[in-house]
Image: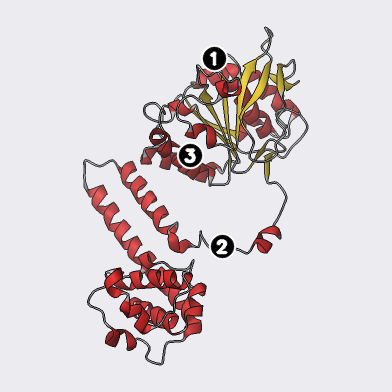
Amino acid sequence: MIGLKAERNLLAAVIVQPNYYRFTTGLVSGDDFSDARLGIIYDRIGDMLARGETVGFIEVVDKFPEWGVKNLDFAEMIQWDDGKVHAPSSASYARHIRSEALRRAAETIGRTMLEGVADAGTAPADVLSKAHQAVEKVLDGASSGVLVPKPLAEVLDGDYSYDWVIPDLLEREDRLILTGGEGAGKSTLARQLCILSAAGIHPLKFHRIDPVRVLVIDAENSERQWRRAVQYMTRKAKDEGAVDPSLAVQIVAGKRIDVTRGSHLSEIHRLVDVHKPDLLYIGPLYKITSGAIQTDDDAAPLLLALDSLRERGLAMVMEAHAAKGSSEHVREWRPRGSAALMGWPEMGLGLSRVNDAGDVELVRWRGDRDERSWPHFLKRGYEWPWEAA
């Protein structure tokens, strides 16, 4: 009942003094109201103000047939303005409504979890995954303040510095997809990025950097293959770096996963919670989802799942098969399948062999969204597997 009183107070406040409506946007939305009719009224008042229309009790009530608001009239609404409603308290009313909405959502999620656990045919991991998704939906709803605009001047006054994970190569929330033919060395390059940066060594310039926490989710190669491929590089990085990468890199290898399944994605988020990586290697893309990625509809749930990891503030490195049959040199190295894979990452690099020694050109099959200093060529190195040419 207290929550309903706050809902009525908020509507009365913004109807009597509409200029206070702007102090409540971002704090609450119509979905947060326990009385759905009042939620509709709140959202539609915002639409009226956006169009420059006059807002008052008469004007609002006249819209009820258009909005589908029933069993509510002018006589009842005018009583909400009982002289005790304080328009400058609009933000406080809004926060109380949001708090009550979260309380109701928590109770609903709790009941759903109990019912799911009681059902012997439902896997506990799926119960937790659905609960996790429900919590995220509640916390990331329209009333979370995600879409609150700022003046351009405030944006320009912000921090211009880069939040590097690997200086000049990868910033937090960057998404890099590596492509190339079989044996071109894209997996070796991905491992070099992980192991050297974890040791505190720049993976292509080889000077000291701040050590990077690394999580590897390799759905294709086994632990045995990792042992054979990185033992020398790991030992050398330990000797020359600031940190032993064998202890700084956490790895899950040889496990086929489907990040579009809630239980699998939740498990990866749990690993991110525990290990707090700066850099996540995950892939290859065709091994972390079910079926092919031929269409945008195939790609959409995969990219949505990966973006939920990227939003944890880490940089991501992935591998994909290169496309075939294209007549354009650059386009030959874009990921095979849906065109959405080409437009999604911040960077796309294809390893194109240029000689019998195995040296490669790093072909940008999509333009960098921001300035990065990836070399144009890599050569097979003596000290490290790949060196900038």
Res. 370 image quadrant: top right
Q: Secondary structure at mark 3?
A: helix
Q: Secondary structure at mark 2?
A: loop
Res. 352 image quadrant: top right
The span from disc 3 to disc 1 (Cα, nearest Å) is 24 Å
* Residue found 26% across the figure and 82% down from its top: 73
Is residue 367 depicted above or below 147 in this figure? Answer: above
| Outermost residue to the bottom | 83
Dot 2 alpha-carbon crowd within 10 angstroms: few under 14, some 14 to 19, many 20 or more: few
Give the camera-side residue of 130 and 169.
169
- What's under tag 1, amino acid-wise? Glu
Query: Which quadrant does the C terminus fall into?
Result: top right
Left or right: residue 273 compared with residue 121? right
Image coordinates of residue 25 in percent, x first then y, are 48, 69
Query: Which quadrant does the N terminus fall into?
Result: bottom left
* Residue found 74% across the figure and 37% down from its top: 209
Identify the mark nearer the N-term, 3 or 2. Answer: 2
Q: Which mark is residue 64?
A: none
Image coordinates of residue 320 in percent, x first then y, are 51, 25
Identify the mark nearer the N-term, 1 or 2. Answer: 2
Mark 2 — residue?
Answer: 149
Give the camera-side residue of 193 and 255.
193
Camera sees residue 35:
no
Give the camera-side residue of 338 and 233.
338
Is residue 96 depicted above or below 265 in this figure? Answer: below
The span from disc 1 to disc 2 (Cα, nearest Å) is 47 Å
Mark 1 — residue?
Answer: 182
Res. 333 image quadrant: top right
Left or right: residue 366 compared with residue 258? right
- What's under tag 3, amino acid-wise? Leu
Mark 3 — residue?
Answer: 306
- What's under tag 2, amino acid-wise? Pro
